[in-house]
Structures are given as C-alpha cells and as structure tokens.
Image: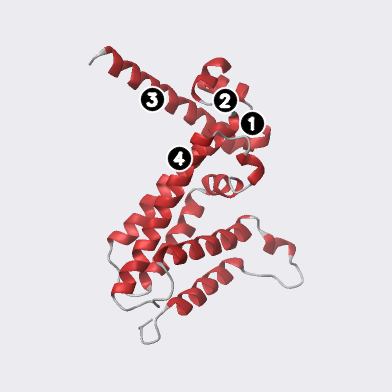
Amino acid sequence: MGTLERKEREKEHRRKSILKAARKIFFEYGLLAASMDMIAETAELSKGALYLYFKSKEDLYVSLLEEGLGILRRMFEEVAARQTQGVQALREIGLAYYEFYKRHPDYFQILKFADNRGLHSKVSHEVLADTEKCSMSCLQVVASVYARGLQEGIYRKDLAPMQVAIMLWGTSNGMIALIANKHGEFMHDQPVDFEKIMFATWELLLSALRATSAPA
C-alpha cells in the first residue's frame, strides 16, 4: 500500500469515527443541546481536529442524514427487487418507509429536522448537495416501482413516476410525523389512531393512482 493510499484510508477511518461519535451525541441530546466539544470528547479528538473534517456541528448533523437515507434506499431496493405485481408493490414501499421509522426513529427525526430552512443556512453547500443526491436516489427507486406498474397497465398515465414518488414521500412524511409526535395522546375526548389513519391514507392514494380497469 502506497503512502497516499494509506493516508486516504486513515482519513476515511477518522471521518467514520467522528460520525460514530456524532451519532451517539446527537441521538442522545439532539442538535440544539449537542456541541462540538461533546463530540470531540466522545471521539477522543481535539475540537480542532473535528473542524478539519466538518465545518460545523450542523454539517455533522446533516451528514448523518446521508447514513439514514442510505438505509432507507436499501429497504426500498429490497421491495423493488421482489418484482411484486399490482399496487401491492407501492403498498410495500409505504410499509418499508414506516418500518424504517420504527427501526430508526432517530434518523427519521434528522430527516424531518433537515427540512427546516433555517438549518440549511448553517450547512455547507457540499453537504447539502450530497444529501439531496441521497434523497433523490430514494425517490428514484419509488419512481421505478411506479414506472413498472405503468408498463403493466396498473397505474394511470397522466402522472409522471417522479411526481408520484414525491407525492407519496410528502404524504408519508406528514403522517409518520404525526405518529412520531404522538398527537393522539392530546386528543382525550376523541382518541385518534394515527397509524390506522396513515394506512387508510395510503389506500386512498393507491386507489386514486390505479388505472380504471386495474385490479387491486
């Protein structure tokens, strides 16, 4: 192994160690309460060393989102690889997203907080660009499932696959956020099962997307 290759491996190893420490701190304390000092101590590095890899704690926070989106993309790809017929394929995409939230709620919280436009002003353009690429890769998998259904004659043809992917993404984000924030606990007079409502919402969307002659 050459000197340059060894240095690059050491650099990547250090970066992963920092992200591991950041994951521990952010998942325990959240973005606002966490600090670069806390992350540096956990990573057993000086704070100056952290800034050689990440320009701010916000950069570190959003960089963790790339990890979460990578997990989500793989879950979507597993669904797509099954070649499930009919609207069941999109139904399983929705279930995979909900399963992602249940398995990785901390990553989901980062995903939701990353929508905060105020956060974007504190994050470098490079990190934002990388995150957008990861988000787009998830949407492309969903769009590919819809595109396959178009070829099968399952779905209506007046909506582009990416439009549908964004529609499903936005709806699922909103419904899962309601579940994550436990809004139902504050509705004592008329308790609401938001999980049940989420499933019903997906079925309404799937029904609306289905071609007139397509089977359920």
The residue under label 2 is: 39
Q: Residue furthest top?
A: 3
Q: Earlier in the sequence, mark 1 or mark 3?
A: 3
The residue under label 3 is: 12
Q: Position of residue 132 (x, y in %)?
A: 48, 46
Q: Residues within 10 Å of mark 2 (few under 14, many from 20)?
A: many
Query: Could you tell me which secondary element the residue under label 2 belongs to?
Result: helix
Q: Earlier in the sequence, mark 3 or mark 4?
A: 3
Closer to the observer: label 1 or label 4? 4
The residue under label 1 is: 34
Q: As displayed, is residue 33 above or below residue 88? A: above
The residue under label 4 is: 130
Q: Earlier in the sequence, mark 2 or mark 3?
A: 3
The span from disc 2 to disc 3 (Cα, nearest Å) is: 17 Å
Residue located 29% across and 73% down the image = 151
Q: Residue furthest left?
A: 1
**Who is closer to the viewer here, 186 or 125?**
125
Q: As displayed, is residue 141 above or below residue 83? A: above
